[in-house]
Image (cartoon, rainbow, N blue to C red):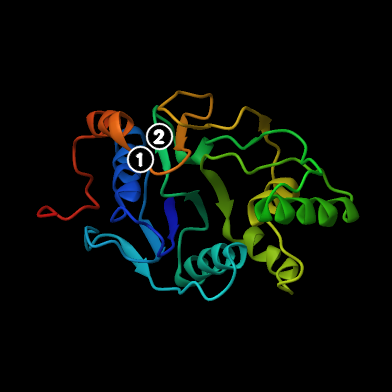
């Protein structure tokens, strides 16, 4: 199965987030097909990476959907793993049976723009008579291309923001409830993944370097 990362242009750290995420993936996963990068292209990527340019012309939730659809249209495997560049795998796993995870029901508290998107997604799911679990756990999620394309009907207006991850999870998956694995320090979780709260600095970055010192096959030898 292939792995997809969609990358924005906002990294202030030369995409080191992605570099170490790729290293963690290679260390802990043996059934990886192609790596797909959609969006910004970090300078250190090797030629064995499938790359697509898609700009960030919309709001974040639209951009994420557009980039995923672009990879599907370009021929990514029918089933693939969707990663973020700040996801770091800490234990061995197989993509084909990586579980689905959620963090319980979506609340009605809109503390920021992200929460407003999630709450609007909840409203859509309620109208459809579907579960309203929050699949915005900071870990990978397995995607089926044909099912994902069905989400297009919800991307009709900038005034109707939606979370593709929460839509997909509640429409097509049965997940296990977990505590979100986004922590300020490297910490194991049942998801096998750790995600940084912000860009990793100081001793935490040093720990990450020690965990994954070996270049992945998706990095240029001279970078």
- In the rendered view, does 217 fall on the left or right side of 57? left
- Contact, mark 2 vs mark 1 (Cβ under 8 Å): yes
- Name which residue lies at 25% across and 60% down: 48
Where residue 103 sits, quadrant-wise, is: top right
- In the rendered view, does 81 fall on the left or right side of 20? right
Q: CA distance from mark 2 to mark 1?
A: 6 Å
Is residue 147 depicted above or below 198 in this figure? below
- In the rendered view, does 160 fall on the left or right side of 30? right
Position of the C terminus, as image quadrant, is: bottom left
- Label 2 residue SS: strand
- Name which residue lies at 75% across and 48% down: 110
Foreground pick, 215 / 180: 180
Where residue 31 sits, quadrant-wise, is: top left
Image spot of residue 33 (x, y percent): 36, 51
- In the rendered view, does 64 fall on the left or right side of 103? left
Residue at the farthest left position: 222
- Label 1 residue SS: helix
- Name which residue lies at 62% across and 27% down: 179
Residue under label 1, please give it.
25
Is residue 210 depicted above or below 44 in this figure? above
Is residue 125 depicted above or below 154 in this figure? above
For disc 2, the neighbor class at 10 Å (few under 14, some 14 to 19, many from 20) is many
Image spot of residue 146 (x, y percent): 62, 62
Image spot of residue 108 (x, y percent): 82, 44
Residue under label 2, please give it.
89
For disc 1, the neighbor class at 10 Å (few under 14, some 14 to 19, many from 20) is many
Foreground pick, 39 / 1: 39
User: Where residue 103 is drawn, which disc sits there?
Assistant: none
User: How many numbered marks does the figure carry?
Assistant: 2
């Amino acid at each position: 199965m292939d792995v997809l990362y969609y990358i924005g242009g906002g990294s202030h750290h030369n995409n080191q987030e992605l570099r170490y995420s790729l290293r963690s993936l290679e260390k802990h996963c043996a059934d990886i097909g192609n790596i797909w990068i959609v969006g910004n292209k970090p300078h250190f990527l090797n030629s064995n990476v499938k790359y697509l340019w898609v700009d960030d012309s919309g709001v974040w939730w639209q951009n994420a959907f557009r980039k995923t659809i672009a990879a599907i249209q370009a021929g990514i495997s029918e089933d693939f793993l969707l990663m973020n560049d700040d996801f770091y795998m800490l234990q061995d796993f197989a993509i084909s049976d990586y579980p689905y995870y959620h963090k319980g029901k979506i609340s009605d508290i809109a503390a920021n723009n992200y929460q407003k998107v999630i709450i609007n997604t909840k409203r859509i799911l309620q109208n459809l008579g579907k579960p309203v679990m929050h699949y915005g756990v900071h870990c990978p999620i397995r995607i089926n291309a044909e099912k994902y394309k069905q989400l297009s009907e919800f991307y009709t207006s900038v005034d109707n923001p939606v979370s593709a991850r929460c839509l997909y999870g509640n429409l097509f998956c049965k997940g296990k409830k977990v505590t979100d694995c986004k922590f300020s320090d490297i910490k194991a979780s049942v998801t096998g993944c750790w995600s940084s709260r912000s860009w990793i600095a100081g001793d935490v970055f040093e720990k990450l370097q020690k965990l994954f010192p070996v270049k992945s096959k998706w990095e240029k030898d001279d970078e």
